[in-house]
Structures are given as C-alpha cells and as structure tokens.
Image (cartoon, rainbow, N blue to C red):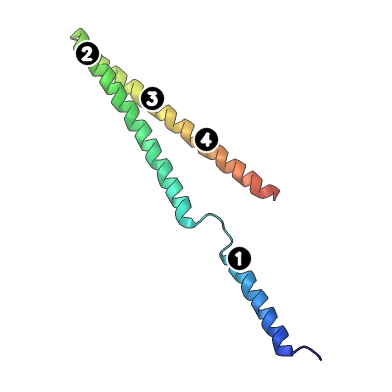
Amino acid sequence: MAEDPDGERLRALEERIAKVKGAVEGPAKRHQDSQYSQANLAWRMVVELVAGLGIGFGIGYGLDVLFGTLPIFMVLFIFAGLAAGVKTMLRSAKEVQERKAAEAAAEGDD
C-alpha cells in the first residue's frame, strides 16, 4: 500500500524545522559568554595598570622615607610603574589579538 502523502509532507516539515532549529542553536558560544570574556579582559587590563601604579608608588614612597628625600623617588617610580602597567596591558592586548587571529584562521580552514 502506498504511503500517505500527508505523512511525507509531515516528515519534510519536521526536517525543515530541525534544520532551522539547528541553525538558530548552532553557535557553541553564547552571546553572554563573549561579553563576559571581553569584560574580564577589560578588568584585567585595568587591574594591571593600577597595580603598576600602586607598586611604583609604594617603592618610591618607601625610598623617599628611607633616604629622607623630597618625593623625587615617588614621582620617578610612579612613572616607571605607569610604563610597566601600559607595557603589560599592551602584551595582554597582543595575546588576545593573536588568539582571535588563530580562531579566525581555524574557522577559515573549516
């Protein structure tokens, strides 16, 4: 006996629905995960900069107290801490850029 034409249409419809659901649910990484990753990176960079400034301030202030000088060491070490913090931030940004380029290259190969 021949198969019911409505049954064939129903199976075809179910296949189309499954394809559409697969396309919608396809990305493995959710939107919230990528935003969390970006926020995490931003906070990491802020902490690196502030840590550099704080360490520079602490070393400079300590040397000024130890030697009894004007705040010359504090100013010098704050600038050194700022430079170290910026250098660390740039290194972090370069790591992220290289990781994104590697991901884009991996997606291009697929």
Q: Earlier in the sequence, mark 3 or mark 2?
A: 2
How far from the left and from the top, in percent, is residue 82? 35, 26
Cα–Cα gap, marks 2 and 1: 64 Å
Q: Which residue is mark 2?
A: 64
Number of other residues with Cα within 10 Å of mark 2, as a class: few under 14, some 14 to 19, many 20 or more? some
Disc 3 to disc 4, C-alpha distance: 18 Å
Helix, strand or loop status at disc 2:
helix
Q: Which residue is mark 4?
A: 95
In the rendered view, tell whether residue 33 sits above or below residue 23: above
| Three-letter code, disc 1 | Ala
**Which residue is disc 3 drawn over?**
83
Q: Secondary structure at mark 4?
A: helix
Give SS at disc 3. helix
Residue 109's mark? none
Task: Tell me the amino acid under the disc marked 2.
Answer: Asp
**Residue under the image location 47 percent in, 52 percent down:** 33
Q: Position of residue 84 (x, y in %)?
A: 39, 24
Could you classify mark 3 by the number of other residues whose Cα lies within 10 Å: few (under 14), some (14-19), or many (20 or more)? Answer: some
Spatial CA distance of label 1 from label 4 is 31 Å
